[in-house]
């Protein structure tokens, strides 16, 4: 969420802010003790990437390459051509940056970060302000680096995280409140609810299942659709032992199940659960302090 510590973390990693505790190592290099050496190992694309809008794309990238210490015509040409190709912006090489769409400007910013061919790319809100088609294009570029570079991506757009990331860290109030593969986080943070489709009266299903936990059922023609949170069941195993209880209760009532499956949990659900829990804990602490 806003104020979680994302920007502060990025500023420390990129060397713009010295940490007061802990360590930062980039490709095995102590980023605090050897900041210049560490910076050689990553490319950084900040949010709202600064560009020289009066320059042509190749002019801007050549200028930036020189600032990054790339010397010699051959080396400069190779760096610019490689980054243009990697960022899929070669077709705009002679265009003035100020005349480009927001999506293409983002690609130029990505090409800038790629000039030194670093092993690590740090991207801050890379799809901010883009339309859906531009977002998909940038996400496709990011996924193209899988297995080639490490991508450190900061964003609060959770569909973007699910579309591009293999490992997620959720921050709230400067603390890590969740970490792991998106699928792992979804299963770990799920409520253990089950969705079902059956044949029969909604009232009959509610009566048959009400003893197992919180249940809601709606009629849809000849079928009913419902949701149940089976009490006393480990959320991570609800699709096993919880499903068994539901099957038994429905069969004992003489009803028929057509479908039964764990409720799909999105990363947005996980995010809301983890950050809301933290906020609730903070509110409880404040209430205790006020009471004292």
Image (tube, rainbow, N blue to C red):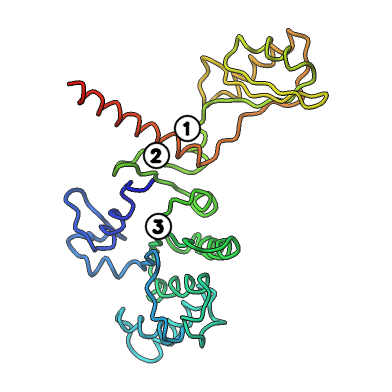
Where does residue 206 sit, x and y in percent of width and height? Answer: 68, 14
Task: Give the x, y percent position of residue 12.
Answer: 25, 57
Residue 257 in the image: above or below residue 273: above
| Quadrant where the image shows the C terminus | top left
* 1 and 2 marks in contact (CB < 8 Å): yes
- Residue behind mark 3: 152
The residue depicted at 44 percent of the width and 70 percent of the height is 110
Residue 178 image label: 2
- Residue furthest bottom in the image: 73
Q: In the rendered structure, which disc, 2 or 3, sits on the residue that comes first in sequence? A: 3
Q: Position of residue 168 (x, y in %)?
A: 43, 46
Viewer-nearest residue: 271 or 44:
271
SS at circle 2: strand
CA distance separating discs 1 and 2 = 9 Å
- Could you say which disc has been placed on residue 29 in the image? none
Disc 2 to disc 3, C-alpha distance: 16 Å
Residue pictured at 28% horizontal, 58% vertical: 13
- 10 Å crowding of disc 2: few (<14), some (14-19), many (20+): some
Q: Which of marks 3 and 1 is nearer the N terminus?
A: 3
Q: Name the residue under label 1.
A: 189
> What x and y, as percent, mark residue 46?
37, 65
Q: Is mark 1 on a helix, strand or loop?
A: helix
Q: Distance between the residues labelled 3 and 1?
A: 23 Å
Residue found farthest to the front: 290
Residue appearing at x 51%, y 78% in the figure: 100
- How crowded pointer 3 is (Cα within 10 Å; few <14, some 14-19, many 20+) is rated as some
Residue 109, image quadrant: bottom left
Of residues 200 and 67, the one nearer the viewer is 200
Given the current orientation, which residue lies at the most extreme right position? 222
**Is the N terminus in the top left, top right, bottom left or bottom right quadrant?**
top left
Is residue 156 positioned above or below 47 on the image?
A: above
* Disc with the residue nearer the chain's start (1 vs 2): 2
């Amino acid at each position: 969420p806003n104020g979680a510590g994302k920007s502060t973390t990025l500023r420390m990693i990129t060397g713009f802010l010295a940490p007061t505790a802990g360590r930062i190592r980039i490709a095995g290099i102590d980023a605090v003790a050897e900041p210049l050496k560490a910076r050689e190992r990553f490319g950084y694309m900040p949010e709202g990437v600064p560009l020289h809008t009066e320059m042509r794309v190749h002019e801007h990238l050549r200028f930036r390459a020189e600032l990054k210490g790339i010397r010699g015509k051959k080396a400069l040409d190779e760096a610019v051509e490689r980054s243009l190709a990697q960022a899929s912006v070669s077709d705009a090489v002679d265009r003035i940056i100020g005349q480009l769409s927001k999506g293409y400007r983002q690609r130029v910013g990505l090409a800038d970060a790629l000039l030194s061919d670093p092993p690590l790319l740090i991207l801050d809100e890379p799809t901010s302000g883009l339309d859906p088609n531009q977002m998909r294009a940038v996400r496709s570029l990011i996924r193209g680096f899988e297995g080639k570079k490490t991508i450190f991506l900061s964003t609060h757009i959770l569909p973007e995280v699910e579309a591009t990331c293999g490992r997620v860290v959720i921050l709230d109030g400067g603390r890590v409140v969740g970490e792991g593969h998106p699928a792992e986080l979804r299963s770990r943070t799920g409520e253990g609810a089950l969705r079902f489709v059956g044949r029969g009266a909604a009232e009959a299903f509610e009566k048959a299942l009400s003893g197992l936990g919180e249940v809601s059922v709606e009629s849809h023609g000849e079928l009913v659709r419902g949701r149940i949170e089976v009490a006393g069941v480990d959320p991570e195993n609800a699709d096993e032992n919880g499903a068994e209880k539901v099957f038994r209760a429905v069969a004992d009532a003489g009803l028929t199940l057509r479908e039964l499956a764990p409720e799909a949990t999105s990363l947005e659900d996980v995010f809301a659960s983890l950050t809301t829990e933290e906020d609730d804990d903070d509110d409880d602490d404040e209430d205790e302090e006020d009471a004292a």
